[in-house]
Image (cartoon, rainbow, N blue to C red):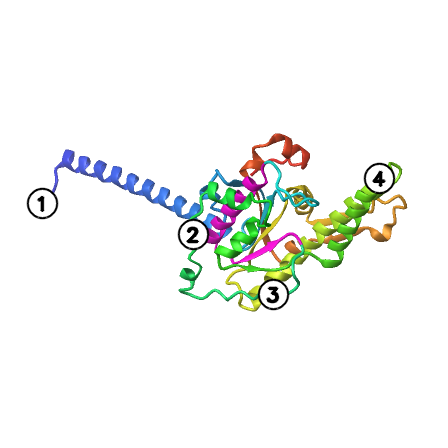
Amino acid sequence: MYLNGPARKKDLASGGRWAVLRWFISLLLFFYILFHFSLTIAGTEYATLPVEYGRVIYQYNGKSPNQLFIIGMSHRNTLTRQNGDNTSRVQAEVYKIGEWLIHHEGLELLLPEGFFQKKPPKTEKVQPGMEEKNNCPELDMNALEQMLSHNETFINAEMLLKKHHLLRVKQVEVESIYNNVNQSLQKLINNGGKACDYPAVKSELDYLQERRTAAMLQKIPEIVEDQFRLGNINSKKAIFTIGMSHLHKIIRCLDENRIRIYSSLPANDKSKDYIADLNLKRGNFAVFVILPKTLLDNPKVLEMNRLDKIKFQ
């Protein structure tokens, strides 16, 4: 059957419209797949990271599958071991962020700041079907805050994450530098009343703290690679928890792709200067710096920790 002129033109016009519509739908589908694929490569679908717990404030080399998630946090008082006004709340948010990373990003390795026993108890390797073993409880923020607020017993977010999830916990501190920092801190406390000594002692402590932060940062790729090579983790990913005060130094190193620490001691001994390429760059690691909501929402705290000028991602 042949169509007459007007009917044929109408049919062609209708077919043309459908062709354009199909082309437009295909184009939208293509861009959706492309966008989703790019997020999958980067491993950065942080739109789903619950905003009530925190957010990513800085990203470095985001498309690499080797990933380090740095969570800035608030610790108990170094000397009294007591909680501050918001310590337990921040710790609860850190727990929730860590838990989200475990469930959504497959994190199996935790690297906490601080020096603990040299040979921590062995944890079992994660095997298929072992998820039920932990019987991880659903803990809301109120329950977490209550657990973390007791000053009589010491417990923190990392200890709870280790207790409730199948995590490897590895030492990231360099013992000699860690001990030097503690000795310098004690010297500062003991010389607190001597005004003439304070600037020199404080300068030494600041220098050692920078060396300590750099040492941890440089050590992380080696630990991750080693755990992956041994088959203890299924991907080169780790959570690194550290005090918020260290974040601006870490971000500076990432921005510059290297570590630069100059001696600020009175003699300005150049042999104490430390300049090195960033091991995270050499290991092709993506780095995501995350800040808990309570810290993020406090402008005074951000300013004190030199994060108020950071252009958050």
- Please report the residue visible at 81 percent of the width from the left and 42 percent of the height from the top: 202
Residue type, mark 4 in image:
Tyr
The mark that comes first in sequence, 1 or 3, is 1
The mark that comes first in sequence, 2 or 4, is 2
Position of residue 245 relative to residue 135, above or below, is above
- Please report the residue visible at 56 percent of the width from the left and 53 percent of the height from the top: 159
- Disc 1 target residue: 1
The mark that comes first in sequence, 2 or 1, is 1
Residue type, mark 1 in image:
Met
Task: Label 4, secondary structure: give it.
Answer: helix
Q: Residue 102: say if magenta.
A: yes
Task: Label 2, secondary structure: give it.
Answer: loop
Could you tell me if residue 309 is visible in this image? no
- Disc 4 target residue: 198
Inter-mark Cα distance, 2 to 4: 48 Å
Tag 2–tag 3 contact (CB < 8 Å): no
The mark that comes first in sequence, 2 or 3, is 2
Residue 258, percent from left and from top: 71, 50
Indicate which disc residue 311 carries.
none
Inter-mark Cα distance, 2 to 1: 71 Å
The span picked out in magenta is 86-114
Inter-mark Cα distance, 2 to 3: 31 Å
- Disc 3 target residue: 226
Residue 227, percent from left and from top: 58, 64
Residue type, mark 3 in image:
Asp
Could you tell me if residue 90 is visible in this image? yes
Tag 2–tag 4 contact (CB < 8 Å): no
